[in-house]
Image (cartoon, coloured by chain):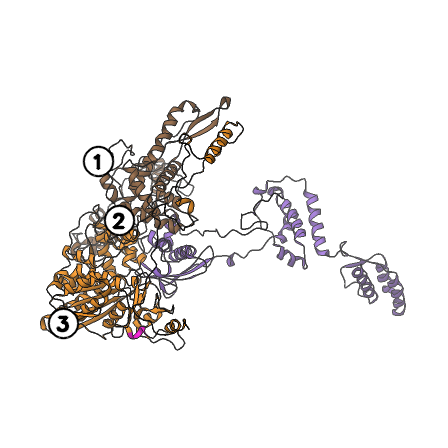
Amino acid sequence: MAAASSKTIRCCYRVADGLISSNPQFRSRGTVTLLQQSRAFSTTQKTSQLEESIALRTRLIPASASYYNANPEYCDNILALEELLRKHETLPTVPGDQAPQVKWKTLVEYRDMIGGYVKPSRYNRVSRILNRLNRIEPSLLPQETKEALEPYKHVANEHLNIPRPRTVDGLGRAYGCGRRKTSVARVYVVEGNGEVMINGKPIMDVFPRLHDRESALWPLLSTSRMDKYNVWAVLEGGGTTGQAEALTLGLAKALLVHEPALKPALRRAGCVTRDPRGVERKKPGHLKARKMPTWVKR
Amino acid sequence: MVLLPLSLRCLGAPRLPLVLRPLPRVFPTSGAAASFTTSSTLLANPPKKANPQKGGNVKNLKAIAAKQRASSNKFQHKRKKRDIPERKRQYLDGQRKIIKNTIVLSNTNAPAITLPEMAKELAGNPETENTVFEIPGSVVDKLRHIEAFKTGQHWPYFQKPGTLVRKESTEIGAMINAVNEARLNKTELHERRILDGVKGSGRSILLAQAMAWAFQSDWVVISIPNSLDLVLGHTEYEYDTHWNVWVQKEYTAALLQRIHKANAPLLKNLKSTTPHRVGKTEKTFQTLLKLVDAGIEDSTVSHDIFMALIAELSMTDRPPVLFALDNLSLISRLSENRDTGFAKIHAHDLGIPNIFLSYLNGTKDFPRGLTIAATAPSPRTPDLTLALKGEKPGPWDKTDERIAPSIKGAKVVKCDPLRKEEVKTLMDWYTAGGIYKGAVTLETVAESYALSNGNPAELFKGCLRLKY
Amino acid sequence: MPPPRTLFLRTSTLRIATRPIHYPALLRCYSNKTSPQSTPPPKTPATPAQDALPHVSEEAAATAGITGETKPELEQGTPIQEMINRSAEARKNAPSVLKTPSNKRSYSTEVTPIDAGAGLEAPANILSMSLEEPLPPGAKFPLPTLPIPARGHLQYRYSPLMVQVTNFLMRHGKKATAQSVMDHVLSILRTKPAPKQSITYTPLIPGTPPLSSLPSDPLLYLQTAIDSVAPLMKIISVKGAGGAKDMIPSPLNIRQRRRMALEWIVAAADKKKDRSGLAERFADEIIAVVEGRSAAWDKRNQVHRTAIQSRANVVVDGRRQSKKNTRRFPYN
């Protein structure tokens, strides 16, 4: 209330300063025209007297009905959209999956458009209306609606979204990063004769278990390329199984940089897919992820 | 005042003979003997069945009557018979150790392979590198007696024991040749070597190869197959004031037994004239075999006999000696044996390691011979590792200053990873022996090489692993 | 990756085949083999991308037919040699290659044959392969053939039986320990003397190779034992009429059968009095099964006997047709 009243007062001052015409948000009712007419023929003395008398009586009305709202831009926006929807509510619609695919502005982008803070729930309200409007049978969609929807569409720069092609660097190295559980493997592959170095050590020292060594080198083993490449890798985090299988993925990715044609074979060998499993979180009320405390009668 | 002499004695040096031996373990042989055990229910005799016809005691009769009453009661719940776990047969003393240490050298299921014999003429010949040889039958028994074969090696999978001759093998073979030449020329040559490498790199196999050639060249072979037995505190030990070391008489007697078995024909022909201190007396033995036998018969003098044997073999005009010890790392630190003050005894103060190391570092020399030791993968002995590299420890390192001098002057033979050609040779052998079932191609060789990193033990395991 | 092995020879597999027989139905879509029966080219265009109109010459011939002009030759073009022979002008302007009477050259642009005895270290097959069919784009070396061989997948690299037995022997999720136990079991089977033929009748699974050959293939040894002693049925007891228990035999799948067999084998092994390790006990029991000495046989016979006795209790749904089992031992 305080903010609104202070605004009003400021407006009044502005009117008194003769700034009415410069502020498009306001229009006066009746009195201003009177003022303009009087300006036309009266002397400056008379005019100033008249202006003063009028200014005291003028009540200015904001251009938007939602001016006294906390977020008038949003309010205008939603009112306009709701009006549009009301207007075209009777038009036939298509099911959601058949509607033209469109990505609306994200919440952040919408806030920028409005120029202020918008609650997520309010944004959802807008997006609901937009989706409903979008579902109107495309052939019957009025031009007016089409134009109205346009500013809400997400503008994507296709040129920025292209994945960077991985290439072999000037020294003949291909890089691949693999993850499994909490392990990360950074792998560099060069053409060579089958030497493997992990964390600066031979593979025997890193993986004493044969199974892990097999897992780690599976991309090369399954494609009969063990004697064609050299591997240099850095392993971090996790245990032996995680590290070995992180290396599998990293090695496969690096190998694909050298030979993209190997993808079908590596896919079938199970080397390309990231295993998304990790430790299940502990829940409140449980002792571990799933374990419950012992049942006590009372 | 009565306590005074006793307490003074505690302060003094240990007197002889102070025998520390593990307490004999008493196993209850029958239920009749009172047992001091927590598993009383298991050891208890089965309760005697009451026989009412014979007239059991009153208490039993009462119990039976109560039981009958109970059984006549219809509403009485029947009690389930509780299963008493059947007691399993105990192993006899030492039986498990025998099972654990049994060496199998032949697999009758495996196909027969014809391999060239590892003859002494081939020792040191670089052309024999990268070839698999069969250990000659005459030597196999001797190697078995001297415990050159270890469990966990590849022997049980093939019909006949065979080994690959590598670069390191020819290096040792060349040394044996050089000593043999010195024998012909009547010059002196005592070589000292330490085999070093990672786990499974073939050090013990190299020792066995050296012994095989030494036996064929009529050498006297003395081998300590596993120094773990010396330092674990499981063999009895006592302080000997004459030699100023802790001697392990039982172990030494067993060692003499092994020496006897492996070298009997040779020792029989070696005459002896010098008297030797045996216990408190001095004796002269006609031959070295009789000397060894004296130590086997009376274990109390076994250490004296062993020292006498070593001294005899160090005389000129004796055949060359191969003095070998496996797991050098284990005697390069404190042993688990305790002295009277309950402090750990340094392994160098134990009789046999002491004499071995004095030959290894050249304090003592055979006129002709080869003293050779192999390191062990564990435990970690930083002092030995540094000494093998020839480096000095840092100023703040906690060091054992006895280690570096103990191996001073001995040359290190590194057991490097196999080369790809050797991997291929081995894989061909495994294929012929029915171990490896795939094709041996450039690719599979590269795969095995990468997976094993050229480690012979891992290569064998990988080829043995079934890939279906 | 070794090629899949023939485990043993069956008489049915022995045949004298001079050339490979292809079964078009068996060829997968991603197989590199081509079907021998080539389908005739489609007469109508299959896709809009293909040209619907006839060839230019054909079209011209059709127009000429209507207008009565001379048709262009459709069957064959006029050979250049003929034209040269016909006109002196052409003979003069012809390129020198065509003027020379003989077309034979002293050299050939075709692939030079590699001398087999040149002592090349590189395997000849790879070299010839790369010459015959050039590498596809995005490959630096010959690509592996698809489908990938069995056990070529990272997660399925061991045989199903091996995985099942390993998991059965596993305790507290310690897979590496279980695998080393498994390795020990197989090495015991490999090194122990071959099993003897039992005096009593032991119904080993049909297709078992001679017992003397079993140690050379320890996994087949294990499989023979487990699949032989595995029951075909299990007995489910259901409350029948009048409070009586009805025993209903119910068929098991191969995994369930193997699990029952493993439970019996391990139970029999644990009952033995010697205190050896798990691997030794288990391996000894496997040998005992093949020799017909194991207590697991009694359990299996008991189950089968009960199943036969209570076969009347089986409710057969006539509408459901079971798929015919076409798998043959050894299942994998």
Residue on which disc 2 sits: B438
In reply to whether residue A135 is colored magenta, the answer given is no
The residue sitting at 52% across, 28% down in the picture is B73
Q: Does the magenta run of residues contain B404? A: yes
Which quadrant does the C terminus of chain A fall into? top right
Tag 3 residue? B274
**Near-viewer residue (B431 or A258):** B431
In the rendered structure, the answer to whether residue B102 lies left or right of residue A233 reads left
Q: Horizontal placement of B151 versus A62: left or right?
A: left
Considering every residue shown, the one lying at the far front of the view is B2
Chain letter, colour orange in render: B
Label 2 element class: loop
In this picture, is B19 found above or below C9? below
**Label 2 sits on what residue type?**
Gly
Q: Residue at x 19, y 73 (%)?
A: B365
Give the CA separation, mark 1 to mark 2: 24 Å
Q: Colour of chain C?
A: brown
Q: Which residue is mark 1?
A: C15
Task: Find residue B384 and report its horizontal and vertical position in percent.
Answer: 32, 70
For residue B335, which quarter of the picture?
bottom left
The crowding category of the residue bearing disc 3, from other C-alpha atoms within 10 Å (few below 14, some 14 to 19, many at least 20), is: few
Q: Which residues are magenta?
A: B401-405
Q: Mostly what secondary structure, the magenta segment?
A: helix
The colour of chain A is purple
